[in-house]
């Protein structure tokens, strides 16, 4: 069980209270996801729905439309490796417009057996803006730890190109607050001023993490476990992993002029009940 978040500094406490009141959850489009969301997640919690390579892009939009009809604010992931072509994109966008969905999150995604018209997230973003998409909030991914075979300058230039077509950045999960803060300051220095939502794991069971790390292929939120299995040990310390460690490390820096850190985004791995219990417990401790 994760511990309650305790903060003494009044300004940090107020910032965190606001952050937890607007915290968003990422869910995976499985068979019972809609049922679990309705059962455990309040309507005022914003949701994103991953684009699962195993399920396909249309299943993501199916769930997003259903959740929007149930009263949630929801943003589907659009994957460059799953949106087949511009015609497919237009159909997906039209479904979202009809459902009143105003948010989207654009990713490159893992390659599949069926190549698409879009080579990467930037290409999909460009095509999206050539449609009458109606989205007022478009997210893109951020990678604070970089890439071992790609230079920092190349990565920041790619992010800068995408940022011109987006409204916010959500990071992949990184366990070191210092790494995230250094990256966020470098964004600011390079003139990339989009608000950054830091990706954190929710209150996820060890059994779920083991299953995810076994290669279920359930979307972007699991990639850090599939590709960086050495990180798994962090979830198996005595008492389990506590997401508040990342949050407390970054809380004093939210809203400061040297970065654009705006809040946090929870990768739930569909462990919605314990994650919502953690959120509400934290809100009580901050109130």
Image: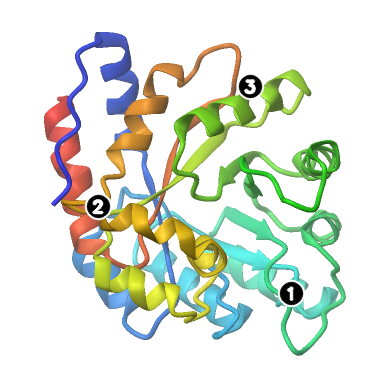
Residue 197 % position (x, y): 51, 38
First in sequence, mark 2 or 1: give its number: 1
Identify which residue, 190 or 71, lies in the foreground: 190
Residue 201 % position (x, y): 37, 52
- What is the secondary structure assignment of the residue under circle 3? helix
Mark 2 against mark 1, which lies toward the viewer? 2
Residue 75 shows in the view: yes
On the image, numbered disc 3 is attached to which residue?
185
Q: Residue at x 55, y 32 (%)?
A: 179
First in sequence, mark 3 or 1: give its number: 1
Identify which residue, 236 or 132, lies in the foreground: 236
Residue 81 % position (x, y): 74, 74
First in sequence, mark 3 or 2: give its number: 3
In 3D space, how far apart are the residues under numbered discs 2 and 1 (Cα atoms)? 36 Å
On the image, numbered disc 1 is attached to which residue?
81
Res 70 label: none
In the figure, 73 relative to 91: above or below? above
Q: Residue at x 58, y 24 (%)?
A: 260
In the figure, 37 relative to 161: above or below? below
- Label 1 neighbour load within 10 Å: few <14, some 14-19, many 20+: many
Residue 49 shows in the view: no
- What is the secondary structure assignment of the residue under circle 1? loop
Res 237 label: 2
Mark 3 against mark 2, which lies toward the viewer? 2
In 3D space, how far apart are the residues under numbered discs 3 and 2 (Cα atoms)? 30 Å
Q: Is residue 126 left or right of residue 39?
A: right
Q: Is residue 191 left or right of residue 236?
A: right
Quadrant of the image occupied by residue 59 = bottom right
In 3D space, how far apart are the residues under numbered discs 3 and 1 (Cα atoms)? 31 Å
Q: Is residue 169 left or right of residue 263?
A: right
User: Do residues under tags 2 and 1 come within 8 Å of each other at their CB atoms?
Assistant: no
């Amino acid at each position: 069980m994760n511990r309650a978040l305790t903060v003494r500094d009044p300004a940090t406490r107020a910032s965190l209270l606001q952050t937890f009141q607007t915290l968003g959850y990422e869910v995976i489009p499985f068979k019972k996801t809609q049922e679990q969301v309705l059962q455990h997640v309040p309507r005022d919690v914003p949701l994103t729905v991953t684009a699962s390579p195993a399920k396909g892009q249309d299943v993501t939009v199916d769930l997003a439309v259903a959740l929007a009809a149930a009263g949630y604010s929801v943003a589907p992931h659009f994957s460059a490796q799953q949106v087949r072509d511009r015609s497919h994109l237009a159909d997906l966008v039209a479904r979202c417009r009809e459902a009143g969905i105003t948010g989207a999150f654009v990713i490159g995604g893992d390659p599949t057996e069926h190549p698409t018209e879009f080579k990467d997230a930037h290409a999909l973003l460009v095509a999206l803006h050539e449609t009458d998409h109606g989205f007022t909030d478009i997210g893109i991914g951020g990678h604070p730890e970089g890439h071992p075979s790609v230079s920092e300058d190349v990565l920041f230039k790619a992010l800068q190109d995408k940022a011109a077509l987006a409204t916010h950045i959500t990071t992949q999960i990184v366990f070191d607050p210092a790494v995230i803060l250094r990256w966020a300051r470098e964004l600011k220095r390079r003139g990339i001023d989009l608000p950054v939502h830091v990706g954190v794991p929710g209150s996820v069971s060890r059994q779920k993490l083991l299953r995810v790390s076994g290669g279920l292929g359930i979307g972007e939120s699991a990639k850090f476990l599939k590709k960086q299995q050495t990180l798994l040990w962090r979830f198996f310390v005595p008492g389990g992993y506590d997401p508040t460690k990342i949050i407390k490390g970054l809380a004093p820096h939210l809203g400061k002029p040297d970065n654009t850190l705006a809040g946090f985004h929870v990768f739930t791995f569909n462990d919605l009940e314990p994650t919502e219990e953690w959120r509400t417990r934290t809100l009580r401790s901050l109130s």
